[in-house]
Image: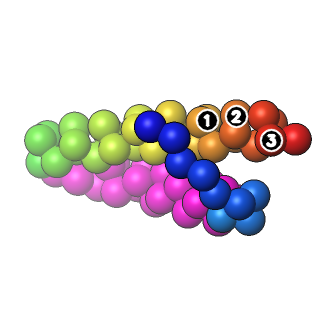
Amino acid sequence: MKVEMTEHEREVLARLVRVRIQELGPEIHHTASRALRAELSDLQESLERLEHKLADASTCAA
């Protein structure tokens, strides 16, 4: 899949992803349910991969 966006849009999306990753740490830590904790950890890993892709897109566009 290919998505086109402006540099500003990429920066906004990257910032949102970064903030959500930071929020997930304490959320995972304070979650009692193993199933929910696993789901949140999976989400965090997906967001970290997305963050790297967005960073790579920035260097490719430069």
Percent x, y of residue 33: 12, 48
Q: Residue at x 80, y 36 (%)?
A: 59
Q: Quadrant of the rendered structure where residue 35 is? A: top left
Q: Is residue 42 left or right of residue 35?
A: right
Of labels 3 and 1, earlier in sequence is 1
Q: Residues within 10 Å of mark 1 (few under 14, many from 20)?
A: few
Is label 2 in contact with label 1 (beta carbons under 8 Å)?
A: yes
Name the residue tied to disc 2.
Answer: 56
Residue 47 within the magenta-colored segment of the rendering: no
The quadrant of the image that shows the C terminus is: top right
Viewer-proximal residue among 62 and 41: 62
Percent x, y of residue 46: 40, 38
Percent x, y of residue 9: 66, 64
The quadrant of the image that shows the N terminus is: top left
Q: Quadrant of the rendered structure where residue 37 is? A: top left
Spatial distance from mark 3 to mark 1, Cα to Cα? Answer: 14 Å
Q: Residue at x 29, y 55 (%)?
A: 30
Q: Residue at x 16, y 48 (%)?
A: 36
Task: Check disc 3 and give the amino acid type.
Answer: Ala
Task: Identify the secondary structure beneath mark 1.
Answer: helix
Give the main secondary structure of the magenta stretch.
helix
Name the residue tied to disc 1.
Answer: 52
Task: Check disc 1 and give the amino acid type.
Answer: His
Magenta-colored span: 10-32
Q: Is residue 59 left or right of residue 48?
A: right
Is label 3 in contact with label 1 (beta carbons under 8 Å)?
A: no
Name the residue tied to disc 3.
Answer: 61
